[in-house]
Amino acid sequence: MALTVGGVASVALLGCSGDEPEAARPLFEPCAGVAVEALQKAGVDPATKVAAGAPAAGWLTCEWTAGTSHLRIFSTSRAIEEFESESGTAAFADFAVAGRTARQLMNAAPASCDVLFPAEQGVIRMVVVNSPTHQGSDACATLRQMGESLVPTFPA
């Protein structure tokens, strides 16, 4: 019995060591983490917010509507390297928004722009999809414009 109690105490002490495992870091919650003022400045209607995803599934997601596009922000503990190994590094290009370096997924649909920002927790993914009436618009220009006010709200 003494060994069992000692084993439990050792496990409990290990859990409090301060070295938090990668998977245990809390995910950035896009619906709560992006300020209403930042959304408004980006031209996004905060009232159109739709939450999705679950930490247990490895993703938190929030979507909003802007005048000519939809904005989605995803949060995951996965690293950019995992995305690159799945699609190949040639499928990505460097992309900067609001002074922050990111990786753009190049094989996204023409009317969308998909950008991954490294973060301590893993990745914050920002996607802009043009509405059907604005398919010819540059979704990456829209993402960059929106990102000027939104990206500074993302965790480093």
Image (cartoon, rainbow, N blue to C red):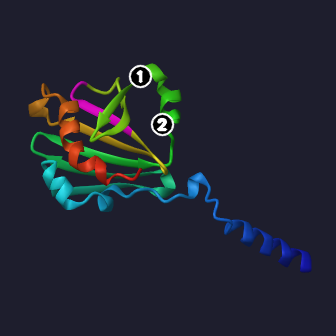
Residue, far top: 90
- How many other residues sit within 10 Å of disc 2, few (<14), some (14-19) or many (≥20)? some
Q: Position of residue 66 (x, y in %)?
A: 14, 46
Q: Position of residue 3 (x, y in %)?
A: 90, 75
Name the side, left or right, on which 2 lies relative to 138.
right
Question: What residue is shown at x 28% (from left), y 45% (from top)?
Answer: 72
Q: How many labels, in total?
A: 2
In the foreground, 107 or 148: 148
Which element carries disc 2, helix, strand or loop? helix
In the foreground, 50 or 106: 106
Camera sees residue 147: yes
- Residue 56 image label: none
Residue tagged by mark 1?
A: 91
Tell me which numbered mark, 2 or 1, is placed earlier along the sequence.
Answer: 2
In the foreground, 109 or 150: 150
Residue, far front: 99
Alpha-carbon distance for marks 2 and 1?
12 Å
In the foreground, 146 or 53: 146
Q: Position of residue 51 (x, y in %)?
A: 31, 57
Residue, far right: 2
**Quadrant position of residue 95:** top left
Residue 153's place in the image compared with 112, above or below, is below
The kind of residue on which mark 2 rests is: Ile
Residue tagged by mark 2?
A: 80
Question: What residue is shown at x 35% (from left), y 23% (from top)?
Answer: 107
**Quadrant position of residue 20:** bottom right
Question: What residue is shown at x 48% (from left), y 33% (from top)?
Answer: 83
- How many other residues sit within 10 Å of disc 1, few (<14), some (14-19) or many (≥20)? some
Name the side, left or right, on which 120 lies relative to 140.
right
Q: Which segment did they paint magenta? A: 110-116
The kind of residue on which mark 1 rests is: Ala
